[in-house]
Image: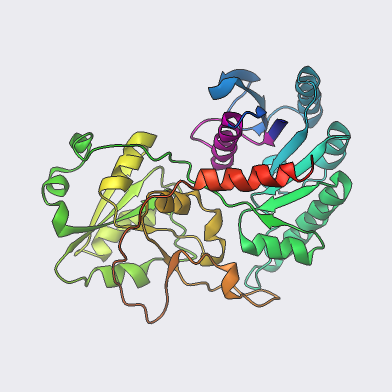
Amino acid sequence: MKIIFICNSLAEGKDGVGDQTTRLAIECAGRGMECILVGFSDRNTTEQQFTSIQHDIPVYRFPASWPFAKREAELKTVMDAHQNIDWVSIQFVSYALNKHGIVREAIPIFKQLFKGFKIHVMFHELWVAEERQASLKMKLLGRVQKFFIRLFLKQLKPLIIHTSIPLYKKMLERAGFKAEILPLFSNIARADSRIEDMEDRVPVHMRENRGDYIVGCIFGSIYHDSWDMDSLLSRLENVAGKKVLISSIGKIGYGKEFWEGLPAKYPRLEFLTFGMQDENFISYWLTHFVDLGIVTTPAIITGKSSSMMAYIDHGIPVYCDQNKLSFDFEVTEDLIDKRLIQVVDDFEFKLVPRVPPKSLIKETTEIFVKALNEFK
């Protein structure tokens, strides 16, 4: 089986969807499939690039700054060069195709390019403002986005539609399309390590007094406008018999000022900023030091968070805010990931033990390959 994966960016470590797609392609290639990767709207390069990775998978990257027509022509050249493609897998990110998330321009181009191929679409995001709390401006934008996403599906007629979370599955079904869940997995590969391997990169007081601490972790940006974390941090401040340290890994970006203000607000807690780190150290820190993972996205969409998947892959319990979003349909329990520990109004902090690590990527690959094989 030969699959060409179309996503936005393939700059390693700089695009979550690109990293997910690359890891999925490598897993598929390891099972004997022939895979091709194309970054169709890559904002991390200014010129066309070609490389090959594990299993000799060819990787093509087209700058997002190129006109659509030029990227279309180059993609056609790539597809012509790789004969007998069985599947086109579109890793759908609307804002990668258009800065407003309106995919009108992509529809006729993709329809023409992929005519005659079996098409798979994986929705990493959908239209915005489905929740009642959204502003009128965002609701109008969401309505336009939805119109063109529906048109995109009607014109391309994919045989398989996947998405990452139950909320998106429900939204697609309410729009008239059958969809199934293809779970995300960790972009941080779990590495075998001993605690002494990288201890020089850990503060001395932490490695010498590890047993005295409960350690939390946050990845990247902090969306404090949806959850300011007071409900969790105020409870952690009162944990008896243990010191509590909250670590931040990666580029904070959004929420940087909020993070920097936390030590003054919670003087009984310790805060540690690592910044950007290599994958091996992140896995090392998660494996040997982190007791609880914290995600700041709303509970109902946390399943699309690669941070959450990194915690789960390493066996770490995940804490998040309770769901506060409402929709024109009932928010039932099946729409929220059961692996989450929601910090509800009457929440009392109790450290949940870690569980054995689990490789999520193999499970996801099984689901993906099984779905494709049903259309041989």
Residue 109 appears in the figure = yes
Residue sitting nearer the eye, 314 or 372: 372
Instruction: Tell me if residue 10 is in the magenta stretch.
Output: yes
Residue in view at x 80 percent, y 59 percent: 177
**Residue 120 percent location from the top left of the image:** 75, 43
Q: Eyeballing the image, is 104 above or below 301?
A: above
Viewer-nearest residue: 198 or 56: 56
**Does 245 lie within the magenta span?**
no
Q: Position of residue 143 (x, y in %)?
A: 78, 61
Left or right placement of residue 188 versus residue 210 in this view: right
Along the horizontal axis of the image, is 212 left or right of 111? left
- The image quarter containing residue 283 is top left
- Magenta part of the chain: 6-30
Q: Which corner quadrant holds the C terminus?
A: top right
Q: How was the colour assigned to the protein in this rendering?
A: rainbow
* Nearer to me, 283 or 109: 283
For the point 68% across and 29% down, which residue is it? 65
- Residue 296: image x %, image y %? 45, 60
